[in-house]
Image: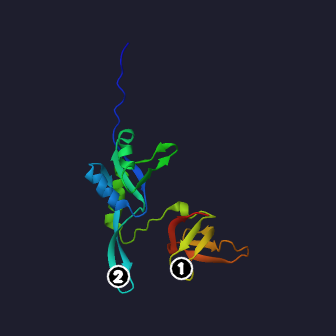
Amino acid sequence: MSETNPPIEESAWYIVYTKPRAEKKLSQLLTKYTLENYVPIRKERKKWTDRFKWIHTPTLPSYIFVKIVFWRDKNKVLQLPGSHHFVFHKGQPATVSQEELDLLEEGLQKYADSLKVRPESVLEKGKLVRIVSGAFSGKTLEILKVKNKTLVVLRFPGIDTAITHEIKVDDLAWEELLV
């Protein structure tokens, strides 16, 4: 009988979903435990009541990339404060190539001022979104239909009449609200 060694797993970039606003702290902890990680950060100009200020915000809120051997290191990552779960795709842990991360970083470096990141899944009929600017700022509305990826037709939940309002996609908050 001949013995065969199990295949040696190589490290890959996996996607971790974090708790809200925990990306930077989780990155620091991963680095402390010598786990390679990447949080795409961009400079953003925010308006306060009395001034404008440049802040560094994660480009992909609640996501961080870790380069690990999945089955060996996953528990180390999940035990850290701020870590929520690994992202899976078709039953397998989702991975990202180094080339994709390099392309993302290049885009952040070269086109940071014009780069807009928003999840496509938010633009689905029936989703509830919070309005962040304009006439209905602060209100939660339901997406009825998407017109040309820049305008969304919304309705007030709970009202059976056909009161709709067209709004620019940029005026929607991209936090998923449960129905």
Which residue corresponds to mark 1?
137
Q: Tell me the tag on residue 52.
A: 2
Contact between marks 2 and 1 (CB within 8 A): the answer is: no
Give the crowd class for mark 2: few <14, some 14-19, many >=20 residues within 10 Å: few
* Mark closer to the chain start, 2 or 1: 2
Q: Label 1 amino acid? A: Ser
Q: Quadrant of the C terminus?
A: bottom right
Residue 73 seen in this snapshot = yes
- Judged left or right of residue 117, residue 155 is right
Which x, y percent locates residue 143?
Answer: 61, 68
- Residue 70 sits in quarter: top left
Is 174 placed above or below 39 here?
below
Q: Image point 34% across, 44% down: which residue?
A: 68
Up/down of 12 relative to 175, above or below: above
Q: Nearer the viewer, residue 141 or 78?
A: 78
Mark yes or no: residue 97 visible: no
Left or right: 35, with 119 as reference point: left
**10 Å crowding of disc 1: few (<14), some (14-19), many (20+):** few
Q: Which mark is residue 73?
A: none
Task: Tell me where residue 119 appears, x and y as whole percent.
Answer: 49, 62
Q: Quadrant of residue 127?
A: bottom right
Question: Image quadrant for the N terminus?
Answer: top left
